[in-house]
Each structure stands twice: as C-alpha cells, then as structure tokens.
Amino acid sequence: MPMRKSIVRTLAVAAIAVVGVAGSAWFAMGDLRPAPVQTATANSDAPALKPSYLVTVRTPTAEEQAQRDALAEAKPAQPVIDLTPRAVVDIAVAPAESGPKATVLSDVNVRSGPGTDSSTLTVASAGSKLPVVGQQGSWTQVTLPDGGNGWIASKFLQQ
C-alpha cells in the first residue's frame, strides 16, 4: 500500500508540472487575435481605417521612359590619365662635401636637435662616415645620406 501512495503522489506532481509548463507557454504566446485599429477622426461616425501596404505605381509617360532607357544604355566615360612628361627636367647632383667627416663609433640615435629631448630621426650605424656641419656644446650636427641634417652626441663620434 505505501508504494501505491508514492506512485499516486508522483503522478499528481507530474500532472501539476505539465499543467504549469503548458500554462507558461500559453501565457508567453499572449493574445494572438489582432488588436482593432483605432483612429482619431473629426467625424466619429466614419468607419475605422485599415492599414494598407499596397502601393500603386503609375506607368511612366513616353518621355519618362525614353529618359530611363537613355540612362540605362549610357556608359560612363572612363577617365584617362595622361602619363606623358610635359617638360624635360635636368637634375644636377651636387658634388660630395669635402669638409671634415666624423666616424660613428657605435650605433647611435640621430636626433632633430642638440639634446636627448629632441625626437629621433634615424639610427646611424657604427663605422659610418658623416660630413660635419657644425657643433653646439657636446653635440655635433651631421649631414645624413638622404641630404637632411641631424644631431649626434659628440662622444659617439671620432673626428
């Protein structure tokens, strides 16, 4: 007998669980009937408007259709880039400076100004020979291979 009561109790709990799940699903679906459309009109006797998603399109006139056809057939002109030179330019290379040169003793930063607070332009490799332009304190201004000037701490140079 006790076993029969536990089976009945289990079946009752299962039935309640099924009803609860079904009720939750029904509640989640909500009301599936469409809500009536209410419109505010000056004349309350007028029937309610129903939304319409149909759009009517008129047939184009002969002139409009001719313009559409002409645009569809027209091809955009491709831009042409003319690469022929317009003038002959002679580039003269200046002879290398015959002034003093400094040899870089170890790889070192070349800076935009005389001081460690100046930005680094490039790194000069050990053994490079660079023309000296001038000096300011413990810094030497040199000409770089690309033609620009930069500053190197004099302790990294041998003149």
Image (cartoon, rainbow, N blue to C red):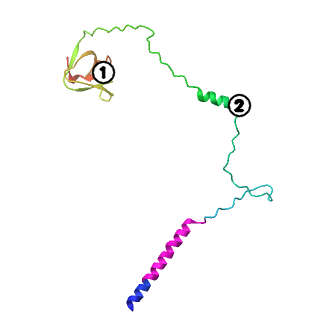
Q: Residues within 10 Å of mark 2 (few under 14, many from 20)?
A: few
Q: Residues within 10 Å of mark 1 (few under 14, many from 20)?
A: many
Residue at the far bottom in the pictured view: 1
Residue 27 quadrant: bottom right
Q: Residue at x 48, y 79 (%)?
A: 15
Residue 130 quadrant: top left
In the picture, measured across the screen, residue 14 lies left or right of residue 158, that is right
x and y, in percent, of residue 102 in the image: 22, 17
Quarter occupied by the C terminus: top left
Q: CA distance from mark 1 to mark 2?
A: 74 Å
Residues tagged 1 and 2 counted as in contact (Cβ below 8 A): no
In the picture, measured across the screen, residue 56 lies left or right of residue 97, that is right
Amino acid type at circle 1 is: Gly
Q: Nearer the viewer, residue 57 or 81?
A: 57
x and y, in percent, of residue 114 in the image: 30, 24
Q: Residue at x 52, y 70 (%)?
A: 24
Count of numbered marks: 2
| Residue 37 against residue 101 in the figure, above or below | below
| Residue 72 against residue 37 in the figure, above or below | above
Q: Residue at x 22, y 26 (%)?
A: 107
User: Callout 2: helix, strand or loop?
Assistant: helix
x and y, in percent, of residue 116 in the image: 29, 29
Q: Which residue is mark 2?
A: 62
Query: In front: mark 1 or mark 2?
Result: 2
Residue 49 quadrant: bottom right
x and y, in percent, of residue 149 in the image: 31, 19
Q: Main secondary structure of the magenta part?
A: helix
Check if residue 59 falls in the magenta segment.
no
Amino acid type at circle 2 is: Ala
Q: Which residue is mark 1?
A: 150
Q: Earlier in the sequence, mark 1 or mark 2?
A: 2
Query: What is the magenta range?
Result: 10-31
